[in-house]
Image (cartoon, helix red, strand yellow):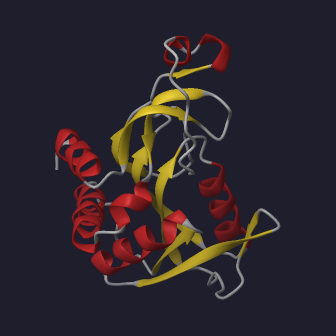
């Protein structure tokens, strides 16, 4: 899939929004990714997850994969679809006191994992999940992302595949041209 086809599907499902948004950081932007809107449509989510797996296959990054691991909450459905495409099991880490931990599952020592996530901005949850896999004696084989909204600035020590790399323009609220025009920012969640 081309990046334009991916963006078209994200826009069609309401996962890529255009307007005036307040980000979790407090900054304002005219673009916002809400991948949960894509994930409402299983067949469309399947198309994108299959596409990122195909990119990994073409790069030779999916040899001997034992499982997919994802950070909760957004990554769970992406991880499930990536695991379906790879025909392996899917597990996830959950937030407890705003920190990711393994509550329901364990990382298997020596197992090779694809780490799957919907969207990254700074990559914190992905890094926490990497740390969990490494602490459990597992190995991260690759990272699968639907959207890298860092524009490729966030780097991990493993092969990383994303369908879209985009860095939306952001402004401090005091310098936001949309605010200057009288528009009010909305906070749709992350």
- Is residue 122 visible in this depiction of the protein? yes
- Horizontal arrangement in the rendering, residue 145 relative to residue 41 (left or right): right
> Residue placed farthest to the right in the image?
97
- Left or right position of 61 against 167: left
Residue 45: percent from left, percent from top:
29, 66
Asked if residue 121 is positioned above or below residue 69 in the image, the reply reads: above
- Give the residue at x 21% y 64%: 47
Of 72 and 134, nearer the camera is 72
In the picture, measured across the screen, residue 62 lies left or right of residue 152, that is left
User: Foreground: 158 or 43?
Assistant: 43
Front residue of this view, candidates 182 and 2: 182
| Quarter of image, res 180 | top right
Q: Is residue 151 visible?
A: no
Residue located at (47% from left, 22% from top): 169
Q: Position of residue 83 (x, y in %)?
A: 38, 77
Left or right: 16 in relation to 4: right
């Amino acid at each position: 899939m081309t990046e334009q086809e991916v963006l078209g599907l994200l826009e069609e499902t309401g996962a890529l929004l255009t307007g005036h948004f307040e980000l979790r950081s407090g900054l304002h932007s005219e673009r916002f990714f809400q991948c949960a809107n894509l994930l409402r449509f299983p067949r469309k989510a399947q198309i994108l997850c299959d596409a990122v797996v195909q990119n990994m296959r073409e790069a030779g990054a999916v040899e001997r994969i034992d499982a997919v691991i994802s950070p909760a909450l957004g990554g769970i459905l992406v991880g499930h679809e990536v695991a379906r495409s790879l025909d392996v099991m899917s597990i996830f880490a959950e937030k407890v006191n705003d920190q990711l931990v393994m509550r329901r599952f364990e990382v298997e020592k020596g197992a090779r994992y694809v780490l799957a996530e919907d969207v990254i901005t700074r990559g914190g949850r992905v890094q926490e999940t990497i740390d969990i896999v490494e602490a459990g004696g597992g190995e991260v084989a690759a990272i699968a992302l639907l959207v890298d909204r860092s524009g490729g600035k966030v780097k991990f020590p493993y092969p990383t595949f994303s369908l879209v790399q985009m860095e939306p323009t952001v402004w401090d609220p005091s310098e936001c041209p949309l605010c200057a025009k009288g528009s009010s920012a909305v906070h749709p969640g992350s």
